[in-house]
Every structure is written in structure tokens, then in C-alpha cells.
Amino acid sequence: MDGVFIVDKPDGMTSHDVVDAVRRKIPGAKVGHAGTLDPNATGVLLVLVGKATKISRFLMELEKEYIFSVELGLETVTLDRWGEVVGRNDASHVALDDILHAASRFRGRYQQIAPAVSAIKHEGVPLYKLVRRGERTPVKTRVVKIRDFKVLDYYNPFVTLKVQCSSGTYVRSLARDMGRQIGCGAAVFCLRRTRVGSFAETEAVPLGEVLEADEPEKLLLTIEESLKHMPRVSVKPESLRSVKAGKSPGADDVSEALAGGASEYAALADPEGDIIGIVRRPDPAGEYKIERIL
């Protein structure tokens, strides 16, 4: 069984909890996921089964969309309402224009400090484990891209927002940074991932439905469907064996020119149209670099 479940992750489970539940449903199958969601977050989680686990990083790199609420004036260790409170500030004076102005400051690229309680690693150890041990956590930063950031609703001290952002963006850090920009602090109150790439919450299946299905394979997206965002490169029959063995194809090994797509990668297909691997877009000489063979 190979493919991708678009799961609607429930509140209170880690992403690994979801993977473990699916693994128990499909004994013997290799199962993984493409992008961690916090335990208290809900929404779209791509769960990969069988050969689809080999394309994890190509799905993790997809843009994400979240709808979330923040409480102005609240500051916590975890940057959300479930963490230890470290500060409460008066936010009664904050106007909608203040929030709109602050949100506009984050569109585009900015250097973001990851939450101290996060899965990002320091010397191979997730930061949240260092926190649990009582150890000091190093500051980890990354450049993220905020394509769009909208205010959906405001009822002081709560603000509901929608963000479209690059992979690796921490919404809790974005909430903290917006609160600091306003001058009163802020922490996430609730969080839902509504889209991963083109996979929207309207396509997501509740985890319970996956676990109760008599034929869960019918809920799977094929590998071909899950890589629909990538252009295709078709390998000639005479080159198929060598390419499957790991030889990077050249211009003479493919029967179709690379078409469209903004991705730096392309899905490598056999003559029947089945995906056999992932390649990087060609260099000026027409050579493709193999990134993954399935």
C-alpha cells in the first residue's frame, strides 16, 4: 500500500501519535508524515504510507496556510495559551489599525526566532527536550517567507488571522513577533492548518474515519496525485533500467521536454506514467540530477 492520507489531525495528539495510529491500522507498512503540527493544533497533516515516505521532504517544502487566533497582552513560555504565563500586559488600547499595521510589517521575508519549545534540533536534540530537562536552549533563527497575512476578526483582546507562509514558519513565533510589534505581546489561543500546498482542509479526512475504514487504501492519494505540483519528465523505454539503477538522465534519456511548474524539482515518470523518482530541473546541458528513486 503506497500513497498519502490527507488527515484532519484532531486536537490533543502529536503528529507522531497520528503516525503510530495509522501504523497500527496498517500493520507492516512504513508510515511517516510531512510536516509536524503542535499537539494542540488541528488541521491538514499529510500522512505517508509505503513508498510515499520517500517523498516526504518534497511535500514538507510546500507552502502552508493557517487560520489562528491570538490573545493580545498574553506572554507565555511556549508562546501559546497552554504554557506557563510569564507576562500579562494591558491591550485594551489596541485598535484594529494597530493590528493591520503590525501584520503588514511581516509580509515578505523575515528572520524568525524559533520557539524555545519546538521540534527544531540543537546537536541532534529537539529544543523541547532540552526544556524538559531544565537545560538552557540556544537561540535558533531561520529566514521565512510570509506571502500573505490577513486579519479576519478582532474582538479585544482576541484577533483571528490567516497566514500563507513558507515551510518552516512557526506560527507561535509570528504571534509573538506581531504582539511585540504592537507593543503588548501576544500568544496563540487556537491554531488550525487549513492547507498544505494545494491540499486543503476540504479534502482532509478525519483521523477516526481512516482508522475505522474497512478499506483505508481507498482514502489514499496516489504518489502521482500527491506530486501534482511538480512538472513531469518521461523516461524513454531504453533508458528506464539505467535510470532506475540511479544514473542521472540526460536530454537523450527523456522523451518529453520539461513543462511548466515553479518547483525546482520534477517528477520522473516511466513510459506508462508511473512515478519512479524525483529529479532536479536540468542544468544548461540538459542533465537532470536524481534526488530520489522510488
Image (spheres, helix red, strand yellow):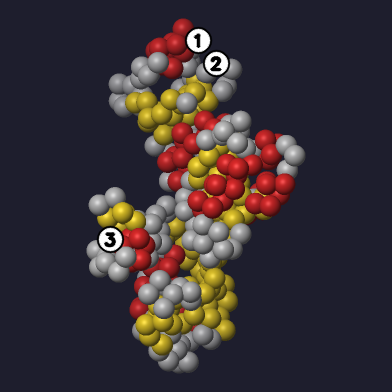
Please tell me which of labels 3 and 1 falls first in the chain.
Answer: 3
Circle 3 SS class: loop
When the figure is inspected, residue 212 is found, relative to residue 154, above or below; the finding is: above
Residue 135 shows in this picture: yes
Residue that appears at 45% across and 92% down: 93
Q: Which mark is residue 237?
A: 1
Residue that appears at 52% across and 74% down: 189
**Residue 169, percent from left and from top:** 40, 59
So how many labels did they put on this image?
3
199 sits left or right of 144 in the view: right
Residue type at tag 2: Pro
Q: Please name whichever residue, 101 or 43, is drawn nearer the observer in this view of the structure.
A: 43
Q: Which mark is residue 47?
A: none
111 sits left or right of 272 in the view: left
Circle 2 SS class: loop
Residue that appears at 72% across and 46% down: 212
When the figure is inspected, residue 54 is found, relative to residue 97, above or below; the finding is: above
Q: CA distance from mark 3 to mark 1?
A: 48 Å
Question: Residue 165 falls in which quadrant of the image?
Answer: bottom left
Residue type at tag 1: Pro
Task: Name the mark nearer the viewer: 3 or 1.
Answer: 3
Q: Are marks 1 and 2 in contact (CB under 8 Å)?
A: yes
Density class for disc 3 (Cα within 10 Å; few <14, some 14-19, many ≥20) is some
**Residue holding disc 3:** 140
**Residue 246, percent from left and from top:** 37, 19
Density class for disc 1 (Cα within 10 Å; few <14, some 14-19, many ≥20) is few
Q: CA distance from mark 1 to mark 2?
A: 6 Å
Density class for disc 2 (Cα within 10 Å; few <14, some 14-19, many ≥20) is some
**Residue holding disc 2:** 271
When the figure is inspected, residue 60 is found, relative to residue 237, above or below; the finding is: below
Task: Name the mark nearer the viewer: 3 or 2.
Answer: 3
